[in-house]
Image (cartoon, rainbow, N blue to C red):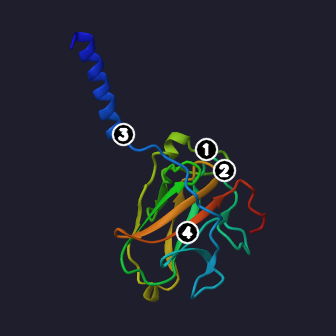
Amino acid sequence: MGHVGRIVAGLVLSAALAACSAPPPSAAIACGPPTALVPHPRSPELTGAPIGPLLIRGPFPAGAKDATALGFVRGRPTKMLVLVARDMDSDIALTGVRCSDGQPLRFWLNKGGGPWSFGPASTPVPDDIMATTGDLRAVLPKIDALAAGTTGYGGYSLFPTTGTYRIQGFAGDRKIGEITLAISDQPYPQGQ
């Protein structure tokens, strides 16, 4: 094999090794319609989309029947409340993806505050900051719901765009549930 042949063979081998070590490309997933909301067992006026012992609450309008969050603004993390509706057997980890292309969803849960501030003159959080802030796997420590009363975890989901998203819950390696959220830029009703 000549010098050029060795260079070509080396390039082919380098490309093959890079392809093997690169993460697989994201792909669309079938998520279905937004998950139906259910009432909290001790506070039925509070509804959410169920994942195991948790209820995911977002900016759902009063009387909403499904997990369609309103008021999305690009560059603004979306407030999220995760209620503990039943006793947790262990810590629970949440992961998520955008259904249209499998892009991972990032969370800022159970951390307090955030690396941003909002006000009348604030500017949107740049896409590259939203894409690298928070956790791809948000771990929520075990809470005994009966002893704690109506409790949960606060924070944000960092949705990059409108669309549908799948959020899954795991206790260790065991999947305990999943929900589909629809994120809409339709304005949130005034006075709610």
Q: Nearer the viewer, mark 3 or mark 4?
A: 3
Q: Nearer the viewer, mark 2 or mark 3?
A: 3
Give the mark nearest the N terminus, 4 or 2. 2
Q: Residue 22 bears which disc, if any?
A: 3
Q: Nearer the viewer, mark 1 or mark 3?
A: 3
Local secondary structure at mark 2:
loop
Give the mark nearest the N terminus, 2 or 1. 2
Q: Which residue is mark 1?
A: 124
Give the mark nearest the N terminus, 1 or 3. 3
Q: Amino acid at mark 4?
A: Leu
Q: Residues within 10 Å of mark 4 (few under 14, many from 20)?
A: many
Q: Quadrant of the C terminus?
A: bottom right
Horizontally, residue 116 falls left or right of residue 33, namely left
Give the mark nearest the N terminus, 3 or 4. 3
Q: Nearer the viewer, residue 188 or 4?
A: 4
Q: Amino acid at mark 2?
A: Val
Q: Which residue is mark 4?
A: 81
Task: Kindly indicate whether the residue at mark 2 contacts the one at mark 4 (C-beta within 8 angstroms).
Answer: no
Q: Nearer the viewer, mark 2 or mark 1?
A: 2
Q: Residue 73 bears which disc, if any?
A: 2
- Between marks 2 and 3, how big is the CA–CA gap? 32 Å
Task: Kindly indicate whether the residue at mark 4 contacts the one at mark 1 (C-beta within 8 angstroms).
Answer: no
Residue 19, x across and y down, in percent: 36, 36
Give the mark nearest the N terminus, 2 or 3. 3
Numbered disc total: 4
